[in-house]
Image (cartoon, helix red, strand yellow):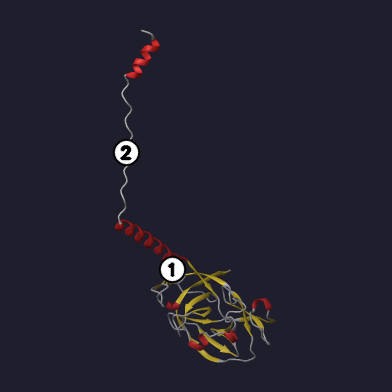
Amino acid sequence: MDPEQESRETHDTDPPAPAEPSLSLRPISHAERAWDLAKTLVVSLSLAVAVRVGIAQAYEVDGPSMEPTLLTGEKLFVARCAYGLALPWLAEALVLWAMPDVGDVVILASPQDPSEDLVKRVIGLPGDVIEVRDLEIYRNGEKLRFGGPHNCPPDRFRGHYDSCETYTERSPSHHWSISHSLEWGQTLPPVRVPDGHVYVLGDHRTRSNDSRAFGPVRASLLRGKVLFMD
C-alpha cells in the first residue's frame, strides 16, 4: 500500500477528540446579592473602625489655645491606642494601659462637654503637685520655665496681639514653647493630681481653657497622643 494512502486511512480511523465541557450560567438571586453586599459592607466598616480606633485619626486645630505649637487649620495625626482603647462613639476609654509623659500633646474629651475634643499638653501626672505663681507653672516645687521671654514669631500666631511673648518650658523628656499675649498674672493654690488623672494646659497660657479652670482630668478621657502635624 502506498505510504501516503496508509497515513490517510489511519487518520480517517482516529477516534474523535473529546468535546469541551459546556459552560452553564445561572442568575444570582436577590438574596445572594444582598448577602454579598452585606459581607462587603461589614468588612469595609470593620477596617474603617480598626484604623480609627487602633491606628490613627486625623484632627484639625481650631482656636488659639496651643499657639505657638499648633495653629488653627493645621492637621494633626493622633495615635488612638497610645494610652488605651478609646472608641469614637464613647466619651471614656474602655481600658487604659499606659499614662502619658509630662510634655505629651494629647487629644481628650472635654470634661465640661464630652462631645467636644480638646488638644492640650500634659503638665502633671498622678501624685504631682501643680501650682501657678504669677502665671508660672511649678511641678512638685520646680519651675517648668527656663527660657525667655522672646518676641512672638508672627508666622506661629493667627491673631494679632498688642503684647505677645514666648517662653520655653521643659520636663525630663520634652521641651516646648509657650506664649502669653495678655498682660495679666495668675496665681492658684497647689493642686495634687489624683490617681487616674492628668493635669493639662494649653501652650497659649492666656488664651486657653484647661485644668486651671476645670481641674485635673480623668485619664480615661484621653483619646490619643498627637504624633505629628501636617
| Percent of width and height locating residue 207 | 58, 85
Nearer to the camera, 142 or 167: 167
User: Which class describes the residues within 10 Å of circle 1: few (<14), some (14-19), or many (20+)?
Assistant: many
Q: Give the residue drawn at x 31%, y 56%.
A: 32
Q: In the rendered view, would you say 40 is above or below 97?
A: above
Total number of numbered labels?
Answer: 2
Spot the residue most to the right.
151
Horizontal arrangement in the rendering, residue 43 relative to residue 155 (left or right): left
Q: Amino acid at mark 2?
A: Ser
SS class of the residue under badge 1?
A: helix
Nearer to the camera, 163 or 11: 11
Q: In the rendered view, would you say 41 is above or below 151?
A: above
Q: Please state, as top left, top right, bottom left or bottom right, where the N terminus lies in the image.
A: top left
Pointer 1 or 2: first along the chain: 2
Examine the image and state in which quarter residue 206 appears.
bottom right
Nearer to the camera, 195 or 67: 67
> Residue under circle 1?
53
Single out the mark in the foreground, 1 or 2.
2
| Percent of width and height locating residue 84 | 43, 71
SS class of the residue under badge 2?
A: loop
Q: Please state, as top left, top right, bottom left or bottom right, where the C terminus lies in the image.
A: bottom right
Q: Give the residue drawn at x 42%, y 62%.
A: 47
User: Which class describes the residues within 10 Å of circle 2: few (<14), some (14-19), or many (20+)?
Assistant: few
Nearer to the camera, 169 or 225: 225
> Residue under circle 2?
22
Q: In the rendered view, would you say 193 is above or below 27?
A: below
Q: Amino acid at mark 1?
A: Val
Horizontal arrangement in the rendering, residue 226 relative to residue 196 (left or right): right
Horizontal arrangement in the rendering, residue 224 relative to residue 174 (left or right): left
